């Protein structure tokens, strides 16, 4: 019976992936990394233990912002850009010791971007969609419990160091539409927007941390942080089909740093017989205008979102399922290097953001149950 339940959960998660046909872009602000695991409990992985994890993330971005001001007229005039992102991640965790474990993560994405390609002679806007899909940028990370979670200890601290490999395609093309000289629909091939590309051509190094503090029985504070350093300035992918002599900063696509921070409180409202954890926290994620290392030229849409993140986590034997819906509270499309180069100070590009995202994850531990501290 237990094996049947496990199989049903696995088929459910895999079914979501197959039906929709995973880090990811946060609207037009390209945030592909998935930083810390986001767990708000202190389940430890012991030596030689193996975990398999899957994660699904969905969002639709359509609200345009310049700075933190929403451009509501874009939706009123039906000129908004809409991005639907379906991201799926396969991961493995393996314990090299009781305090040190490694993670290997393989993402797949299907991103759809629609906008008005042209207006016909009757004045009707023609909206079409293009896609970016396939393998994303693979990540490998080592984690170490600096302060290991123990029943008699209130504080636990986890640190991580990882690499991001440029395995995702940064230059996918699709069919675009235009109005011909004869007033008819015509098509041509063009590179799709960087926000829906599976990869960014960057080799990155990530730093992570996660802290948990028990403030009362079954009540914990948690915080986590993630930063991806990508020293390369730009990829060799042209933004348009030809070099621009006037806009030299944005000729090529930028390879950006990325960041994520989370803080909140988690509680176990039921008895140990029902290992349910609920949490509520805040989440900050985005792309900086200037990278920490290296140059920051190239086409980029920097910015960040602040979200409220309710979540629920349930353990059953060797399995765990987590569900969360980060809901946007504040969105800001900051100025890029290109914007800042404007001597008048007026240049400020826009970006589309989502109202919320849906995250579902499933973890199976081989050989033993999850140990809750």
Image: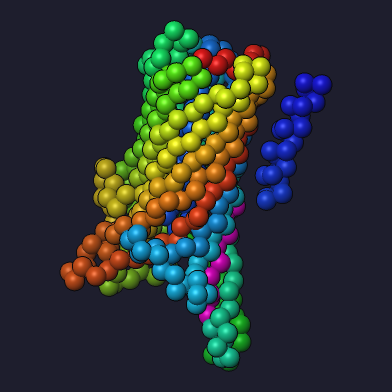
Residue occupying the point 49% across, 48% down: 327
Vertical placement of residue 373 versus 328, above or below: above
Vertical placement of residue 279 versus 119, above or below: above
In the depicted view, which residue is nearer to us: 128 or 268? 268
Q: Is residue 44 visible?
A: no
**Based on the displayed image, in which of its 4 quarters is residue 246 positioned?**
bottom left
Provide residue 202's location: percent of width, then percent of height: 40, 45
Q: Is residue 147 visible?
A: yes
**Based on the displayed image, in which of its 4 quarters is residue 370 positioned?**
top right
Please identify the dominant SS of the magenta region.
strand
Quarter of the image containing the N terminus? top right
Residue occupying the point 36% across, 31% down: 207
Numbered label tally: 0
Outermost residue toward the left in this view = 343
Residue occupying the point 22% across, 64% down: 341
* Span colored in magenta: 109-118
């Amino acid at each position: 019976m237990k094996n049947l339940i496990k199989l049903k959960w696995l088929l459910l998660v895999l079914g979501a992936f197959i039906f929709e046909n995973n880090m990811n872009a946060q609207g037009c602000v390209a945030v592909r990394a998935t930083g810390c695991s986001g767990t708000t409990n202190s389940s430890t992985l012991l030596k030689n233990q193996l975990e398999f994890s899957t994660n699904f993330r969905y969002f639709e971005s359509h609200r345009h912002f310049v700075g933190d001001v929403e451009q509501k007229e874009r939706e009123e005039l039906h000129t908004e850009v809409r991005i639907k992102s379906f991201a799926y991640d396969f991961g493995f965790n393996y314990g090299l010791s009781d305090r040190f474990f490694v993670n290997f993560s393989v993402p797949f994405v299907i991103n759809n971007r629609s906008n008005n390609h042209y207006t016909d002679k009757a004045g009707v806007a023609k909206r079409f969609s293009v896609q970016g899909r396939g393998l994303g940028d693979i990540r490998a990370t080592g984690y170490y419990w600096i302060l290991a979670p123990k029943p008699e200890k209130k504080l636990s601290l986890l640190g991580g160091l990882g690499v991001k490999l440029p395995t995702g395609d940064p230059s996918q093309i699709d069919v675009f539409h235009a109005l011909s000289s004869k007033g008819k629909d015509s098509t041509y091939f063009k590179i799709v927007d960087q926000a829906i590309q599976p990869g960014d051509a960057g080799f990155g190094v990530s730093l992570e941390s996660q802290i948990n503090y028990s403030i009362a029985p079954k009540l914990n504070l948690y915080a986590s942080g993630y930063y991806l350093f990508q020293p390369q300035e730009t990829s060799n992918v042209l933004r348009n089909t030809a070099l621009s002599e006037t806009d030299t900063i944005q000729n090529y696509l930028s390879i950006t740093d990325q960041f994520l921070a989370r803080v909140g409180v988690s509680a176990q409202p039921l008895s140990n017989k029902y290992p349910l954890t609920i949490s509520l926290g805040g989440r900050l994620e985005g792309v900086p205008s200037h990278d920490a290392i290296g140059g920051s030229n190239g086409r980029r849409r920097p910015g960040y979102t602040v979200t409220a993140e309710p979540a629920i986590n349930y353990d059953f034997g060797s399995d765990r399922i987590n569900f969360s819906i980060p809901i946007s509270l504040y969105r800001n499309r900051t100025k890029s290097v290109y914007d800042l180069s404007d001597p008048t100070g007026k240049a400020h590009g826009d970006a589309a953001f989502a109202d919320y995202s849906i995250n579902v994850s499933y973890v199976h531990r081989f050989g033993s149950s999850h140990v809750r501290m």
